[in-house]
Image (cartoon, rainbow, N blue to C red):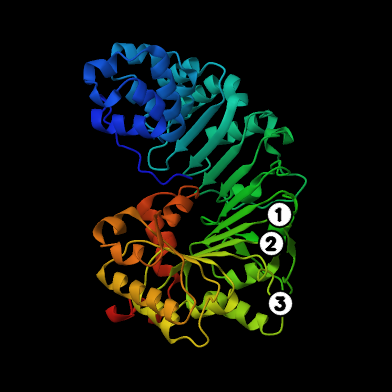
Amino acid sequence: MSTQTTPNFPTTAINLEEFSKVLTELCPSVSKQTAFTSLGPDHISNLPTEILESIFSLLADEVEGDESQPLSHILSSVSHHWRCVAINLPYLWTEIYIIPPYSVEKLRFYLERSRACPIDLFLGIPEDNPPKKEQLMQLLEILIPHFSRCRILDIASGDVVEPLHHLIRLLVSFEMPELECFTFVVEEGTNPTSQAGDDSLPTLFSGHAPKLKQVRLGGPTITRYKLPLTNVTTFHLAAAYWQIPFDTLVSMLAECPALQTLATYDDVIDEWPDQYWGQIDLPHLKSLQIYGDMRHVSELLLAIVAPIENLTVAPVIRDDFIELDSWLIGHQSNYAATLRTLTLAPSLKNSLPFAASCFPLIENLVLVNFRPKILLQLFIDSTPFVWPNLQRMSVRNLNKAAVVVLKTIIEHRQYIDLPLKKLRVDRASWRRTDMKWFTERLEVEIRDDWMVQRENLLYRDEVEEEDRFVLSPNTLSEDETTAAPSDI
């Protein structure tokens, strides 16, 4: 996935310099043919239709808009000519947000312009500003003929309101031939009495969504509905205020034979049995991601049998790997032969030694937050030396202290003949750090691996993410919460 920064175009005009940059990067052959960098704003507004269509198509693939600044509105605001071209390109109008302030006219407008193209539909019902029942019902009635076109269906609601029940009843009866990604998160609601695996639960999409690959569920939606999971490769489960029993998780995952990525958020799993080792067999699982306040990290790792290549624990505290480390004293690791990349967000105190002990053969280490003292102790003072196979480190948000420690670690690895070969840093750290010392010693790449991973999460809000996944106070023990500044 590209880590290039998307230009922030204004809503009423395209900035010439930024647009030239995007055009040069996305379609250099077109920019050379038109000597684009020498053109003025008037020439931009009058580019030939076929060239504009090519540019718009590339931008639609590369530039991510949002509900407040859709790409279709940006492009159709430059000039009359651009507007005429944009209006007649259905793929520019396929991203549809139904959020406050709700607009029937806007919905009809997008559905008409998107024609027969698959659509990406985002429905938001905030608890503090819910629509009137009649208004939401009217919106849903307009949508009914178009649900079968959904490629992405993303539903987020503060509570289980009556119109949402109506929508769910509709989804039970619909077949979704184009649906690839389904997200359904409800923050509040009545605690469900039935559980996944119960044959009496309603099955959404009539059990027929042949292209469904990604499912993200949060809150009571986890256990209220069944889904056709046979072809699902990515599954996200968030607790919100609800948990699911371990046996229910086992039943759900048994219906996902093609699963490659599993992500859990907070303490989503409850009622752990006495014997949970090796109870979840996922033969194709490559990535396991554990986010937030998860109190059973070791248990989940011991329960899953899979060829995991990438493991994420964010945040990670001292207790997360203690049970796993003890178990490994007399047993072989499920992941020793396959795990290559470890992504961690260390807490204030030394939370990494157990990680190094449990996963000694990793080749890539991604550090969501850089803790100079913790890392210095781990890499310099540990005997034997940690992670002898480590080839690449990914770091971000480097300050002066972090740069000094990072240099010390790199020099030490060279001294003990276990040199790092690659370093990845985020763009902000690259700009404020003299990278010459690093580039003379190893390969350096500008890439924020955590940001790339975060783009695919259920919770992607930057402020919320920093609290949930980087350093959530709820995950820290008392002595970690009161750690001295020198320990940070």
Q: Give the answer, above or below, for where 274 lies relative to 364.
A: below
Query: According to the image, label 1 marks what residue?
Result: 284
Asked if disc 2 and disc 1 are in contact, CB closer than 8 Å, the reply is yes
Q: Nearer the viewer, residue 343 or 463?
A: 343
Q: Residue at x 66, y 65 (%)?
A: 338
Q: Residue at x 38, y 44 (%)?
A: 4
Q: Earlier in the sequence, mark 3 or mark 2?
A: 2
Q: Earlier in the sequence, mark 3 or mark 1?
A: 1
Residue 416 lies, in percent from the top left, at 46, 82
Q: Residue at x 41, y 29 (%)?
A: 27
Q: Nearer the viewer, residue 132 or 92?
A: 92
Label 2 neighbourhood size at 10 Å, few (<14), some (14-19), many (20+)? Answer: many
Query: According to the image, label 2 marks what residue?
Result: 307
Left or right: residue 379 versus residue 234 is left
Q: Residue at x 59, y 38 (%)?
A: 181
Marks 3 and 1, Cα distance to the nearest angstrom? Answer: 20 Å
What is the number of callouts on the image? 3
Residue 415 lies, in percent from the top left, at 42, 81
Q: Give the answer, above or below, for where 122 lies relative to 39.
A: below
Left or right: residue 483 versus residue 107 is left
Residue 345 lies, in percent from the top left, at 44, 66
Residue 332: mark: 3
Identify the secondary structure beneath mark 2.
loop
Q: The disc labelled 1 sits on which kind of residue? A: His
